[in-house]
């Protein structure tokens, strides 16, 4: 049985394009593999807490020496890391907000990328002391953007701090393979947007089919 962690980060519950994409992906996946386990994490609806000084101190305090306050402040992080560790596939629906991650998704990332839990740190490794502890996961990232031209070679490539950021931190989530499906032009609401959306829906369905086929092989 494969485990899919389904995350949505849009603040919108209605008319959210990224939620529609991740829902279409999940629906197709479960049509093929109904027995797979799904963990649902809606950070758009319920954002994780922001990290604090107590949180950082707690992370760097050896587990047996943690105070009750330190244990408590790490509880959300422990839960989110357990969910991540169980997942083979992460199906992430996210908008672009101000050219980057929504704050709720950044809060999730800060809670799950944690020393001695999801990465190890060793200066003996020289210039790259961090190494992920988790491995072998597939990330399917489904985004929606109001403007357009964010892909490589596009007119807003340099303004895209969403996809490159996700690709960079995905390594520390234990992701081995990342697939992106993007909708653009939402703010224009014209035929270009209709086409971008229709193509993306087709692409997420095709992706669910090809990933489930790989698992069956
Ligand atoms: C707070 C906020 C900030 C946004 N910033 C950007 C932006 O920087 N660039 C962009 O192309 N679209 C931006 N948008 C538009 C969204 O990316 C677009 O509406 C997208 O469809 C939202 O995802 P959703 O449909 O899943 O809610 C922004 C929207 C909001 C609400």
Image: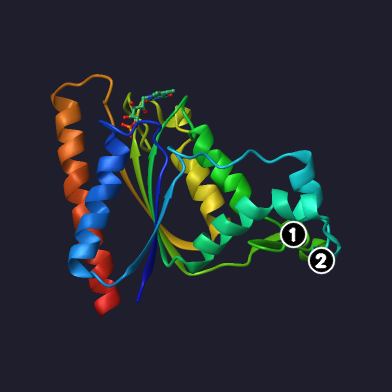
State the image coordinates of residue 49 (x, y, percent, origin top left). 61, 40
User: In the rendering, at what x and y percent does residue 63 appear?
Assistant: 79, 64
Provide residue 110's location: percent of width, then percent of height: 62, 45
Residue 134 seen from this side: yes
Q: Of residues 24 and 65, which is closer to you in this image? A: 65
Can you identify the residue that label 2 sits on? Answer: 124
Give the left or right position of residue 116, taking residue 41 as reference.
right
Q: Residues within 10 Å of mark 2 (few under 14, many from 20)?
A: few
Q: Secondary structure at mark 2?
A: helix
Outermost residue to the bottom: 217
Task: Please report whichever mark, 2 or 1, sits nearer to the chain's N-terminal start.
Answer: 2
Real-space CA distance between mark 2 and mark 1, rounded to the nearest whole angstrom: 7 Å
Mark 1 highlights which residue? Answer: 129
CB-based contact (under 8 Å), mark 2 and mark 1:
yes
SS at circle 1:
loop
Residue, x 72% and y 63% (percent of image)? 116
Ligand 1 within 8 Å, label 1 CB: no
Whether residue 105 is situated above or below residue 178 in the rendered picture: above
The quarter of the rendered structure image containing the N terminus is bottom left
The answer to whether 166 appears left or right of 52 in the picture is: left
Q: Position of residue 130 (x, y in %)?
A: 70, 59
């Amino acid at each position: 049985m494969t485990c899919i962690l389904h995350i949505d980060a849009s603040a919108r519950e209605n008319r959210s394009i990224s939620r529609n994409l991740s829902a279409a992906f999940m629906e197709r996946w479960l049509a093929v593999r109904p027995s797979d386990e799904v963990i649902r994490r809606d950070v758009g609806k319920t954002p994780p807490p922001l990290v604090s000084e107590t949180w950082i101190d707690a992370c760097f305090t050896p587990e047996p020496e943690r105070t009750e306050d330190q244990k408590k402040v790490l509880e959300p992080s422990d839960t989110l890391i357990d969910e991540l560790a169980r997942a083979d596939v992460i199906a992430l629906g996210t908008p672009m907000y101000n050219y980057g991650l929504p704050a709720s998704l950044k809060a999730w990332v800060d809670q799950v990328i944690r020393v001695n839990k999801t990465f190890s740190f060793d200066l003996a490794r020289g210039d790259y002391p961090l190494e992920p502890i988790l491995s072998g996961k597939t990330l399917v990232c489904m985004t929606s953007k109001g403007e357009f031209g964010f892909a490589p070679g596009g007119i807003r490539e340099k303004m895209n701090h969403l996809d490159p950021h996700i690709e960079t931190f995905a390594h520390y989530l234990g992701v081995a393979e990342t697939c992106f499906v993007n909708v653009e032009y939402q703010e224009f609401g014209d035929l270009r947007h209709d086409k971008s959306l229709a193509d993306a829906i087709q692409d997420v369905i095709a992706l669910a089919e090809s990933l489930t086929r790989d698992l069956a092989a």
